[in-house]
Image (cartoon, rainbow, N blue to C red):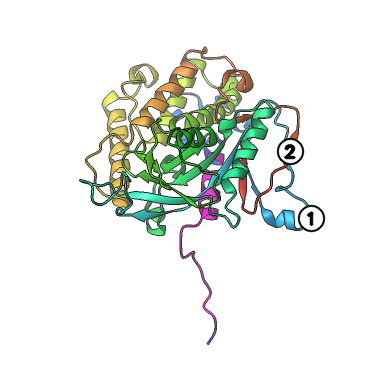
């Protein structure tokens, strides 16, 4: 009997997750044709005023720093190189982890214990679960090395996508990054110290997070709730600023400046699947449109987003799971609105670099040892 050829994965593995998120970051504001751009502008402006041939796509590169290369005689796991970036590019180190759905547990003191009233469904992840149980120490060493070079230690992080099943992944209509919990090394270590939990004890540890309330999270070796708010809002904010600024700086000479930032804001609202009517002045930027029609479009966008979420994670009484998107939108909108409508953004000097590495004209290298992949993402 011939062996059956496998045409699809049997589970949602880490390689699939990291590849999709890298692709998503690559595509955000990386083409003048994003989000139906030409067709919408055709209603407002002379279409040929914008030279699309001059638009330079910005590549996002994902380097998998694998132990296989080390075994072949030297590679990423013995020498990590942070390349030059001409003061415009950013980088983050991400350890992706795939999780499992859980209906609840019987772990004492867990926020998701099934003996507690109304426990939330949640996703559960393992970390520090590599062969030598030194994954967390490797990330700590990397974080410390970056700090010693003048970079932010918060640019080393775990990524826990809350979509855990292939069926959910196939249903998902939005970018996976919008459903991913990020934990930076300083955050996870600080919270653990405060709760007298040792993550460097050579054991596998667990992380749990709620589908509906991302601020309900716990480290589960000796369960404790994380006190701080999720960093996803700040991480997405920095990524969006870098991507939009590169896009904006290129089209700025060709685009009527009085509408530039507002038009980009509508594209961002499209991406985040929110209605920005209380933040953006529709009447000013869409003079030929009926405001009601534009509101109807974004209301439908939100309705479709909510229906897709419910089809994947189920219903919940929590109605605030998308609030962070409105906050991110307003922060991005205010960032550009406060800087003058026709001024080029200095990506290195003006955009925060708390959670992303600001790549300069210098090249840095240092060594770490690991038996598991680490991902360097440059955008």
Q: Which quarter of the rendered picture does the C terminus lie within?
A: top right
The structure residue drawn at horizontal position 48% and vertical position 18%, both measured from the top left corner, is 335
Q: Which residues are magenta?
A: 3-26
Q: Dot 1 lies on which element?
A: loop
Q: Is residue 59 visible?
A: no
- Find the distance from the CA under tag 1 to the CA under tag 2: 16 Å
Image height of 28 relative to 105, above or below: above
Residue 253, x across and y down, in percent: 60, 20
Q: Dot 2 lies on which element?
A: strand
Query: How many residues crowd around disc 2 within 10 Å: few (fewer than 14), some, or many (20 or more)?
Result: some
Horizontal relation, residue 221 to residue 55: left or right = left
Image height of 286 relative to 305, above or below: above
User: Which sits earlier in the primary sequence, circle 1 or circle 2?
Assistant: 1
- Extreme residue toward the right, this view: 73
Q: Is 4 part of what is drawn in magenta?
A: yes
User: Residue 366 has which mark?
Assistant: 2
Horizontal relation, residue 218 to residue 292: left or right = right
Quarter where residue 44 is shown:
top left
Decide which of 214, 379 is in the foreground and name it: 214
């Amino acid at each position: 009997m011939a062996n059956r050829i496998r045409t699809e994965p049997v589970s949602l593995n880490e390689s699939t997750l990291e590849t999709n998120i890298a692709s998503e970051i690559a595509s955000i504001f990386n083409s003048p044709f994003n989000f139906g751009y030409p067709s919408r502008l055709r209603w407002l402006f002379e279409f040929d005023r914008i030279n699309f041939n001059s638009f330079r796509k910005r590549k996002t590169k994902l380097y998998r720093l694998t132990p296989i290369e080390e075994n072949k005689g030297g590679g990423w796991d013995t020498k990590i190189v942070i390349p030059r970036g001409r003061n415009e590019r950013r980088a983050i180190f991400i350890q992706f982890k795939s999780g499992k759905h859980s209906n609840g547990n019987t772990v004492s003191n867990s926020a998701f214990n099934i003996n507690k009233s109304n426990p939330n469904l949640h996703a559960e992840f393992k970390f520090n679960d590599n062969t030598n149980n030194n994954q967390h120490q490797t990330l700590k060493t990397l974080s410390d090395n970056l700090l010693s070079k003048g970079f932010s230690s918060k640019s080393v992080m775990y990524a826990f996508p809350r979509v855990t099943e292939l069926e959910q992944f196939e249903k998902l209509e939005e970018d996976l990054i919008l459903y991913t919990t990020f934990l930076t090394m300083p955050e996870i270590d600080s919270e653990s110290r405060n709760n007298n939990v040792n993550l460097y004890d050579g054991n596998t540890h667990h992380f749990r997070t709620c589908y509906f309330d991302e601020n309900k999270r716990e480290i589960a070796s000796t369960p404790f709730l994380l006190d701080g708010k999720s960093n996803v809002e700040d991480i997405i904010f920095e990524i969006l600023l870098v991507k939009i600024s590169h896009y904006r700086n290129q089209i700025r000479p060709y685009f009527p400046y009085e509408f530039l930032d507002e038009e980009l804001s509508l594209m961002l609202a499209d991406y985040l699947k929110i209605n920005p009517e209380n933040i953006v002045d529709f009447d000013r930027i869409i003079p030929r449109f009926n405001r009601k029609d534009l509101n109807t479009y974004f209301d439908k966008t939100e309705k479709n987003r909510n229906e897709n979420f419910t089809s994947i994670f189920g219903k919940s009484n929590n109605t605030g799971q998308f609030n962070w998107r409105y906050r991110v939108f307003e922060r991005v909108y205010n960032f550009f609105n406060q800087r003058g409508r026709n001024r080029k953004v200095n990506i290195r000097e003006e955009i925060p670099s708390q959670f992303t590495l600001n790549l300069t004209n210098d090249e840095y290298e240092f060594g770490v040892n690991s038996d598991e992949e680490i991902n360097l993402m440059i955008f």
